[in-house]
Amino acid sequence: MKSRWCSREAERLVRAYARRGVDRDLALRVYTTRLLGRDPRLVLHGGGNTSVKTTMRDSLGRRVDVLCVKGSGWDMGDIEPRGLPALRIAALLELRHLDSLSDGEMVNLQRGCLLDSTSPNPSVETLLHAFLPYKYVDHTHSTAVLAVTDQPDGDALCREVFGGRVALVPYVMPGFALAREAAEIHEANPGVEGLILLKHGIFTFGDTARDAYERMIDLVSLAEARLRRGRRERFRPSRLPPRIARASEVGPIVRGLLAEPLDDAGGEWRRAILDFRTNGRIRTYVDGEDVGRYSQVGVVTPDHAIRTKNWPLVLPAPLAGDLSAFKREAGERIARYVRRYRAYFARHNGEREPVKVELDPYPRVVLVPGLGLFGAGGSASDAGIVADIAENTIEVVTDAEAIGRYRPIREADMFDVEYWSLEQAKLGKGMEPPLARQVVLVTGGGSGIGAATAREFAEQGAAVAVLDRNRSAAEAVAGAVAGSAIGIVCDVTERRSVRRAFDRVCRTFGGLDIVVSNAGAAWRGRIGDVPDRVLRQSFDLNFFAHQTVAQNAVRVMTAQGTGGVLLFNASKQAVNPGRNFGPYGLPKAATLSLARQYALEYGEQGIRSNAVNADRVRTRIYKGDLLEERAAARGLTVEQYLGSGNLLKREVKVEDVAKAFVDLALSPKTTAAVLTVDGGNIEAALR
Ligand code: ZN
């Protein structure tokens, strides 16, 4: 590992922060914290922490000695000075003499030391930073260091690798006890450049930001060099079926199995979003004959237990062409996983006070031999973090097994971290938005009603796939919505294009729950002389495309087995034909029937099917002269026509239609319904 310290860059940042009133010490702390945080071999997603001891003015203008330490919720890779809250160090140092300190009291005392009460909570490793007598202290969960220390003889191996340059701290859970232990061990070994926290990570320190940072790089490089020596043969591959099913087919099955039923009738689910990963290293690991052993030993560093749980679920290899056996076996394995997790909870919770609240027993990481791995989370970004950690775990375990045998902390220690009081205190706080954990696909999503619908679903927490004939329009809408979204080019009148788009959604998010079949366009002509060609074109887009989209939707929803929602954009033409609008109205009438047919035939699977009947919305369909013509026929301007032609005398906007789709998605007992969004048009009222 190379040092990425660059004096010119460092000075540039110092000058830039000086203009904003941030002093040199803190600016350099920000600089090297980012250098560490941007290397996934050192730090992942909020892991690790750093500090600097300096002076600052309090609100009375007095200079006080402070410790600026990483605050929780900040990521080292893009930290700002605000992410390193300042604490009065004198008060922190007094805590050194306590016999014990609970985590709750520790957090409270630390908050009491803050110069600015609006700061985030300082790291749980704050006291460890405070007790070490160096200006700069850096802490990472280096992949290479973990591979060396997560061994049955990890301490001996560390002595061999690092010699006298570090002192070793036996595993203790983060908190006051670890801080005191580390300080004592450091005092007994003055002159070391760092501490190896066995089965946890590494601390380095120095009097300058550069020293502390470069000692980290040096020591990690020693671990890397050791991992290159005397490597054994990698994992022996298991026998796999000749042809393996694709991730887009396996994803929905896995996603369905990970969904937790919220009622006995199985109508409501707490779902997960998946993130699929594969590459040579992942395949070597998941295809290994012994994957059932080395994948089940536990997390590489205690921090990860909260994200990934202690063990991944290992599934059988999925045979292409027949997934029924895979689905059955996967179902049994997940049931076994749930039983194992509950037993683990019962075993460690025992009689201990305070009694903990059991977390959901479902896995976060799923390994599929022949294919790769799935990370699961409450959102696409959570699933991505889980998948990143899983990849990192694979790297550590692969390296650990290449030079010895992987052996992390004990199960009881993992339990203590997973059920840590500070984590338990967060349970039940932070409500999820109503469509969190759901995936929605919108056709014709690049503009008008489709784009507004994609935005509205994203606002409600759903992961969104925006399909459009126009790639850049789809990508632009996806790029601008809140939360996770992908834009996919798709011609809904081409079966292969639709299948490809659905496959991509399943590969990206693991499946889908809500499909808004919205793409459409208006053709006109007097019905007695309209050419067949025009009528067939309109039927292709305004009827058959809806059918293709719905067929793909129920295929995926059936694989998941957790219900779903079909939503069709019908039209007022479907119930109230307009003169010369036969080519548009006829297929739309068929599509309205289609919505009901799906409601009828898929209701027992929990799949609901509804339509929205919108009218006079300023969209691509009704733009240009068409709208002007219709307005002129009534002696109105376009604005008057749009705004005053309905009972409420208010213009119907694309956002109004989008809200109707969301309302239907959120109505669990509504199916085969048509929701009218037209400001009131009595001729088109359904009867
Ligand atoms: Zn740590």
Image: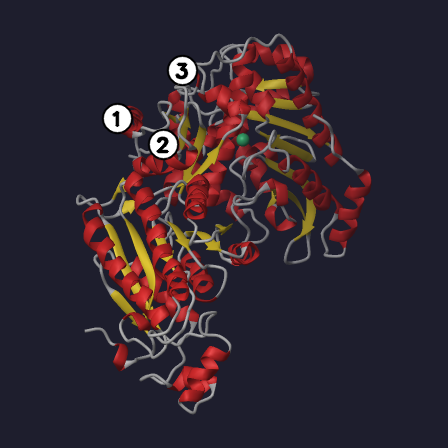
Residue found 24% across the figure and 61% down from its top: 593
Q: Colour mode?
A: secondary structure
Mark 3 or mark 1: whose residue is earlier in sequence = 3
**Which residue in the structure is indicated by mark 2?**
363
**Which residue in the structure is indicated by mark 3?**
293
**Which residue in the structure is indicated by mark 1?**
332
Res. 102 in view: no
Task: Determine whether the residue tagged by mark 1 lies in a helix, strand or loop.
Answer: helix
Left or right: residue 376 versus residue 184 is left
Q: Quadrant of residue 142?
A: top right
Name the amino acid, label 1: Glu
**Real-space Cα separation, disc 3 to disc 2, in angstroms:** 17 Å
Name the amino acid, label 3: Arg
Name the amino acid, label 2: Pro
Q: Position of residue 205 (x, y in %)?
A: 68, 29
Residue found 71% across the figure and 52% down from its top: 22
